[in-house]
Image: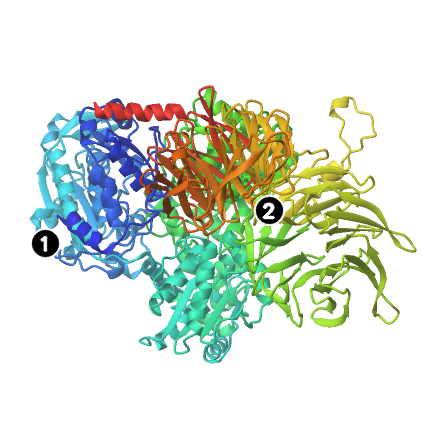
Amino acid sequence: NTSSSILSFIKTTMQPAPSLFTTKKFVLLGFTTTDTLQIKKQIETNGGTVNYVINNQVSFVLADEKEVGKKSFKVNQCIQKNLPILRRSFVDDSLAANKILDAADYKFGASNADGTEEGKKRVLNSEENQGDLKRRKTETTPNPTETTQNNNKGPKPVPKKKVETATGKWRTARIFISSTFRDMHGERDFLTRFIFPELQERCKKLRVHVHPVDLRWGVTSEDTANALEVCLGELDSCRPFFIGLLGNRYGWVPEKYIVPDEPRFDWIKSEPTGKSITHLEMEYGVLRDPSKARCAFYLRDSGFIHNVPANYKADFQEDNSKNAQQLTLLKDKIISKVPPEFILKDYECSWSGVVDGKPMVSGLEKFGQHVLETFWKHFQEEFPFEQTVLTPLAIDRSYHENFIESHSRLFVGRKTILQKLTDFITQNTTTPLVIVGQPGSGKTSLVSYFANNYAKTKQGDPNTLVLVHFVGAAPGSTSIRHTLSRLIQEIGNFFNFSTEKIPEDFKELQTLFSSYMEKLGADQTRKLVLILDALNQLDPTNHAHSLDWLPETFPVNVRTIVSVLPGNVYDVLTRRKREEVSVEALTQEEKSEIVKQTLWQYRKKLEADQLALLLKKEDSGKPLYLIVACEELRVFGVFEKVKEKILKMAPTVPLLFEEVLRRLETDLDKDLVIRTLSFLTCSQSGLLETELLSLLGSRKDHYPLPQSTWSRIHRSLENYLRPAGESGEGVLDFFHRQMPKAVSRMYLQDKKFFEHIHSELADYFWEKADPEQNGMWDGGSLRGLQYTVYHHIQAKQWKNLRKILCDLAFIEAKCENGMTYDLVSDYLQLSEYKSEIPDKIFEEISEYQRFVMGRAHVLVHSPFLTFSMAYSLPNESSPAKQAHYRYYQAGLESRPFLKWVNKPQTSNPCIMTLSGHDMVIRGCHVYATEKTRRIVSAADDSLLKLYDGMTGEEILTLRGHKSSVAYCSFSPDGTMIGSGGYDKLFILWDSATGLVKHQLEGFKGTVTGCSFHPTDSQRVAVACRDKMVRIYNIPALVASFEAHDKALLGCEYSPDGTLLATCSEDHKVKVWNTDSTGQWKELKVLTGHEKTVNSVSWSPDGTRLVSASEDRKVIVWEFTPSSFLIRHRLTGHKDIATCASFDPTGTRIISGSNDNLIIIWDVESGLPVSTLVGHTGSVYRAVFFKTYPKEEELLQDPSKDQEDPQQAPKKLQPSDLTQIVSCSFDRTVKIWEWRENMKICGHEARILSVAFSPDGKKLATGARDKTGKIWDTATGNELAALVGHTSNVFGICWSPDGKLVCTASRDSTVKIWDALTGKCKCTMTNHKAAVRSCAWSPSGEHILTSSDDKTLIIWEESTGAVPAPATKTGKSEGGDINWRSRGILFGHRAEVSTCAYSSDGRRAASGSEDGVIKLWNTKKESHNFSGAYVKIATFSFHTTILHSIGFSPDGTKLVSAGEDNILVEWDATKARILAKMLGHSEGIRGCSYSADGKWIVSGATDCTIRLWNAKTKEVDCSFACEGRVCAVDSALVAYHHVFAVGDGSGNLYILLPEGLEKKTADAQQLEKTENQ
């Protein structure tokens, strides 16, 4: 059959797409365990998920045939929920075809709901209502071996237009139904309820949507003014499909035929009056040329009339003899002209009574079957299945080609500009040409005409591509993502560039577009003419208006022409090198010609005096004004009053659009016009036609606006709307911005009406996203999720907003659909309305805002962690309370999760984490005003990134440096960014566009810092490692001097700009000023640091300096008239102090360090007031910035008496006025709020190792802060601190009796501690490099340690005196007990990073940084002569550093993890791989089996913990940590599994799995049932 042969062909030519099932959720029923795992893997590796709960979020149900046959409980559940139950082959065939196939072809019979026709209709409707979900772009490949036989003896096959029959996506077929009104209710209802749904089901195979059009609904005999025009116009849109129904009534006969004066209606002029509209429809649709129609006629048998009650007979019989005669002639003509196979004569029916006030007939099965089979044959011939279809790219191209044709056809004049465009194309230039003009000036027509003519001159030239893109001309063309994708594909196809997959990520699209430009530049034989019209109409998403996606210069063989309105986009272009052409007003001759040509299309023209009046109008120099004016005159219709009409006509475009609106009110239903235009204007970015019709129809009864009514409105507005595309792929929106402005002025000035319109939109989109309003958010509507919050805000529906924005399910749904940063924007919009929102509502929403903003960097890629992260907040926070309610009380959440039992009960001070750089971030800075906040970062990936500091969204990527960027800073006015780096360049950037303004060279070393003059942004001081300070009056160098004896690391102007402070590797800070000649002179040398000084900064009043040094100290210097004195030495950092600066008030200092901490100090006392923990790497820069609180907050006066002391406003503290931005080695930028007395709970630096005691009741940790700690597992309380190491504690383990703890350190020592007191009992020093890990044998006899010296040492307790004497292999120093080296294990060729014993102690394993694992026999009888273990196997798979290994409880398996992101399970007896587990996106630092071996826990630097089912190797649940995971362990405590995790911020997590045992039990029960 056709589908199998096509499938066979596709299987041999296409590979499955990795993201084929993205957003799709499956349920599996009745399969064996083996099949379940196999299917699950197929689905999940291709982007889908497998659900365990049957709910409305499920996309497909796959079932075994036996399961369906026995109609199990779950099968019946699916049937009740109208979920399609499919065969397993649906997944196999979809993967083979590289697209999701039609589910209807794989259904079991039980899937049609309750088996009734109504049930079928419900299922069909539920499928059809997915229209606004993302459509996967697929291309269909024809099977060249198949043909379609046409045995039709009727009319000749209609010649098909290529564009119509070769559409790239789903095609649309409209069937026009022509019938009389009163007597055909039964037939029309039967077709609508039963036949058309079945026909649609069949047509899915042809990728055709069927839309029946019946204009008898909504067009009554009273609506005589334009009924004929409506009917015949809609008939044209339905060609060639036509159904004619006739009984014994002739239909309504108009007194005269009123149709537009258009050539297509010329035939009506010769028709005698007296014909009914039904008659004229049949003439126009078929009888005038039957060969061009795909039709069917149905002539009813009148025998049923005798059963019709007398009072209803008139509804079925013609009482006018003349009309009866015309009816007979019409039927005779049909019989004579239409082939008999397309006529069903005398079909039978019977009287069935009155239904809903309508006389009805029944017994129409034969009639219905004929319609079904006839039109199924018509559709197969019109849309043959084997036909090759156009790609989406070709469809896009056709829209733009049609746009060019329609907009260039009437173009006149502009010869001078056209010549300039031609000259530009022929000259050598690398800059674009900008066409600018006022709205309506004719830029688009000019561009269309030029592109059309130039393209014709290059037809057939294989080396020249003329590529034109009109923003707004095609569905999706206003999206910069869509635009770039189209340009890339067109260029790649024409010039045969590599057909790489077009990326989804916008940044990758930018990069690919730039690389295509470079490829073009490499071959001068090729030429590209790129024309982009109306850049200002691009949607602002992805910051399209910044034009950072458009190169500043192009290769010499690329000519770029862009058009734009004056405004922000044009302002961006003015900052670039460019040529420019301004489109001015039309000449008198040009104006006259436009009017004449426009009116002559309709065979109309003006008298000379009339034309003169029109051309005197104020805006007549704009083509848009003239075209709209001509359209108004054309529809005016009373030629005798045309002059009067012109005199009264509005003189400007905006006022003319208001006239258009008033005319539409008169021509159509006024209320309907107002609502239609108001909905479109208030919509955020247009509406789908289905959305608009639903809004305009009866929302209560769920009836959309009738198509007949809509068609009249749509035709009247069509010229002002963008093309919507096929099948709802595009949206209805205004093409000219003047129209919505006119709508706002006329209709939306009334605040109540404005809010009412938004309220309707809000409720509509809410219902689309959450149909049952039960908080499940399972409507599958992306647009509902996207727009409901915006409209609720505009409607000021605060209570509803609370329900939505404080709903974890909504948050997850929105993030799951790629709208994380849109969600952040939703919350931020509310801040503008704070004074209008009740305090309690605002406070609760603010809690969720903080939750989302602080975790947006995780939600953006792991939205499924929403619930888990909410539960991890302090217990009293609103998100945590809701998470608890959803899981434990309401049962709304059933997914297993990891409960953080020792979580802090205060909120995390980190407000937001910004990510995007691939390498270490060296610098950051912030520019903040009351209305905006911008953050810039500089990194080792040679890039700078600009972020919106309010939403966290990346705005721009600045490319220009050739290597690591060391420093960045905003100018005081925020217009420029200065950056310097290892490429010895200092670059000044335009902060609005991201373009390079100036590139300053001549540096002889790394540029380490810069400082803009506080009052003159054009003046900047630059520090360089070549010891020099250079002062620029941009771009001129005005001064330079050698400032230090060693490398210069920073400089900063004093607040008044008179002094300059510098710091250096020479341990000094210097202060400079200028003498009377303007030369810079050394004013003071500040000595006090013992090592390199990394940064220096002034207080806001210029009386103090603060410096940070590698000596770990921060020094506060106080300026006196005679000298600088040391005010404080701030000590607290455990590693190099990298930066320090004052807050805007001068009362606080912030410092950052390589110890990963940020400390805030009180300037007066010199004491720390707060410590911020969160970065997992060195903090390179941390600065305060103003938050600009609301005026009413600043004006609070706490001194005044308050009636209620509890309500007295608190005095604003420095922490209320400022926030902090910082950057780190961990590749993140963080925004913090802070409060005084914030303490560190846990370690002060990265936790590097964790280990449970043998009974699981205690937990030991080792960290980068050089300490170990003992914790109570149940409470999370610290029990003891292990202090004595002089460097990082890499490894930690327990003695089998739980009394002792062993630690391994970077200081090359191994220590044994008393677990109760924390006292060091023994120190072993034998390793020659850092000791990376340690393991205590189960017998307690040995300790195994691994080291960077590439060895492992076996230690055993000595019975000699204390301290033990040195042995040949090692020694033990100090303490109460003595351990000595028993033997050394050699064999690793790289640093040995990890080791472990099996639970029986018979084996040991070790892993090294070259990815190699070695297995050792530990049995005494197998030891070699030196007492060392014997190597028994070497495992090799990992390609990078191996971080962790662990044995299964039974010792038969081994799990390993490394920097390659892969978790590997090995057979420990046969040294072979059992499984590879993929899922982490960064290196895995820790792994361990659970105590019973059922799970494997892993933690990675992607900040996630994953719990893997040891049997299925699937992730059962995950957890997001606040920092990079560095170590994990597991235990069984009181029959409960518990997991310990240490992260890079020093946080210790004690995690209990919740719901995991139930999930496992369910899976076991399923397996047991299947086996039975």
Q: Is residue 1221 above or below residue 847?
A: below
Q: What residue is shown at x 47% (from left), y 60% (from top)?
A: 510
Q: Mark 1 points at which residue?
A: 149
Q: Which amino acid does label 1 sit on?
A: Gln
From the top left corner, tell me how far across and down residue 511 is, in percent.
47, 61
Crowding at dot 1, Cα within 10 Å, few <14 / some 14-19 / many 20+, comes out as few
| Foreground label between 2 and 1 | 2
Look at the numbered disc 2 and give the secondary structure of its residue: loop
Q: Are marks 2 and 1 in contact (CB under 8 Å)?
A: no
Residue at x 35%, y 31% (from the top left corner): 56
Is residue 1536 shown left or right of residue 1015? Answer: left
* Residue corresponding to mark 2: 1177
Which amino acid does the dot numbered 2 rest on? Answer: Gly
Q: Residue at x 54, y 47 (%)?
A: 744
Residue at disc 1, secondary structure? loop
**Number of residues whose C-alpha sits closer than 10 Å to that of mark 2, classed few (under 14), some (14–19) or many (20 or more):** many
Give how far across and how far down residue 789 sits, in percent: 51, 38
- Mark number for residue 1221? none
Please state the horizontal and vertical placement of residue 885, each as a whole percent of the image: 49, 23
